Amino acid sequence: MDFSPESPYAFLSDEEVRAWYAYMKVQLRLRYEMNRQLRVDHGLSLADYDVLVALVSDEGGVLTVSDLAIRIGAERSRVSHQVRRMTQRGFVEVRPSADDRRATEVVLSDVGRETMTAATPGHVALVRSVFFDALTADRTRELAESLERVYESLIAHGTLPRPADHP
């Protein structure tokens, strides 16, 4: 591809441009489709679902706002606003941390757990139909290995701390 020096892709090889453009198209469209499906079927946003998945993945269903932000890769302020909205809907509860009174803990509520349980089968069906059904088992394994390497690079070179669930 020919790009002018002003192009954001001017400093990438043709294959890097191809890979990056393909990733961006998939990532943006996939987030749109997942958000739409969750909203239509369960009245959840993808951001709600991200928080619920993080809390359900924690053994006690409790994370501080800071740990939750690190786990889902978001700014703490954005997560605070998201948690406030989710608290109003009964999906989560907040309380001061017993370990650090300056920190706020986010607790998965029974309503949040029930909503997550109800939303997951349709969400997984969508992910399977638009993502995994397009890949062979070998390509799925290769993709997983490649994305794990990219994630490690993000952890090593990014600005967010290493998540507690990723030693």
Image (spheres, rainbow, N blue to C red):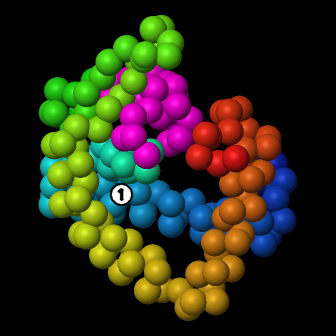
Label 1 CA crowd tier, 10 Å (few <14, some 14–19, many 20+) = few
**Is 74 part of what is drawn in magenta?**
yes
Q: Main secondary structure of the magenta part?
A: helix
Kindly identify the amino acid type of the residue bearing the numbered disc 1.
Tyr
Where residue 76 appears, as percent x and y from the top left, is 49, 24
Left or right of residue 35: residue 14: right
Question: Residue 1 appears at what percent x and percent y?
Answer: 75, 69
Residue in the image at 46% along x and 26% along y = 64
Q: Is residue 48 above or below residue 19?
A: above
Residue at 82% in and 59% down: 12
The one of 164 and 146 positioned closer to us in this rendering: 164
Dividing the picture into quarters, in which one does residue 55 lie?
A: top left
Taking the spot 74% from the left edge, 53% from the top edge, the residue there is 152
Q: For this view, does 111 lie left or right of residue 19?
A: left
Q: Which residue is mark 1?
A: 32
Judge left or right: residue 109 versus residue 23.
Answer: left
User: Magenta region: which residues?
Assistant: 59-83
Q: Position of residue 94 (x, y in %)?
A: 30, 22
Is residue 47 visible in the rendered structure shown here?
A: no
Which residue: 62% across, 40% down?
A: 163
